[in-house]
Image (tube, helix red, strand yellow):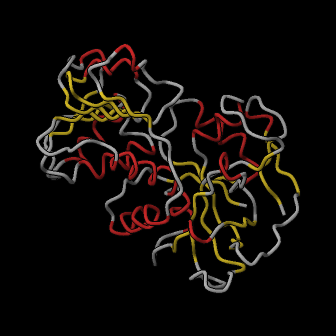
Amino acid sequence: MRAVCLSRTGGPEVLEVRDVPEPEAAESLLVIKTAATAVNPVDLATRSGQIPTSLPAVLGWDLAGTVEHAPEGSGFRAGDRVLAMTAQLGTGVGSMAEYVAFDPRYVAHVPDGMALTDAAALPLAGVTAVQLLRRTPDRRGRRILLIGAQGGVGGHVAARLLDEESARTDLLVRPADRSAWQERRAGRPAEGVVLTDPSRVESGAYDIVIDAGGAPGLIKAVRPGGAFLTITPFSAPDPDGHPDVAYTLIGVELDRDDLVSVAEAAARGTAPDHGITVLPFEDAAEAHRRLESGGFRGKLVLVP
């Protein structure tokens, strides 16, 4: 089978589509025929060597496809449409392959009517957002700043925050994304504004700051006794310099219930619609270049 492989770290040009052995059916593993797999920032960091991993490796965290083999009692059967987050760095299982064998405890059914290319874009960003919000302090009556609503995780966080009417949520986005987010929040219950200039963010103005975009300097926006949460370990503030702020770095964990929650939200139309760009495996390097440029909007999905 073909897979997007990494044998050495470096720029996008080090990515290769290679023939590798197909995973063997096992009693405990679900074998999925991949229809689509998303490209995420963690893939770029792994490819560049910023995040160490054992090499050679198959890249990728997100996938959607159909069940090829299902263990008895797994709750799945051949032909089922499914999605999964394989968490390649922790499990060693990359999603960018024609077939993937994975633990069925962390796989969910794709809702009826949802395209598999759309489903593949959901797992990592959506599950991270769910777990991030679960770890935020009580949001009732609080003033919240979300940094990076235009990104994958930020979009999922924003979609959920804007459905909460008990808090005021301000969004900080790139200038080019301001009008789109003003439209998205129109008619939603949460009060707040859309900001574009980090230098205009008021110091000590927020009870909670959620950083999904990598702006560590905005920990200054948290008032004493407030909280700063981030998903960007390589662009994070020094918590020792802010002893009066509760600091939390979020690392995503495998959780089937959270994956189901993300898929159901997308099926209801309450998840963000970033727009999907589909490319073949052979264009994996191009996908990395586009995402790395910083100007790409939407979600990049690779198909075998």
Choose between 232 and 201: the one closer to the eye.
Answer: 232
**Figure quadrant of residue 37:** bottom right
37 above or below 289? below
Q: Is residue 85 left or right of residue 29?
A: left
Residue 28 screen position, x and y as percent? 70, 74
144 above or below 29? above
Residue 169 screen position, x and y as percent? 20, 39
Choose between 289 and 65: the one closer to the eye.
Answer: 65
Q: Quadrant of the C terminus?
A: bottom right
Residue at image x 71%, y 55%?
93
Residue at image x 44%, y 53%?
126
34 above or below 159? below
168 above or below 101? above
Residue at image x 20%, y 28%?
206
Query: What count of labels does the image hold?
Result: 0
Residue 254 screen position, x and y as percent? 54, 56
**Figure quadrant of residue 76:** bottom right
Q: In which quarter of the image is the N terminus?
A: bottom right
Residue at image x 56%, y 62%?
117
Residue 286 screen position, x and y as percent? 69, 40
Choose between 1 and 246: the one closer to the eye.
Answer: 246
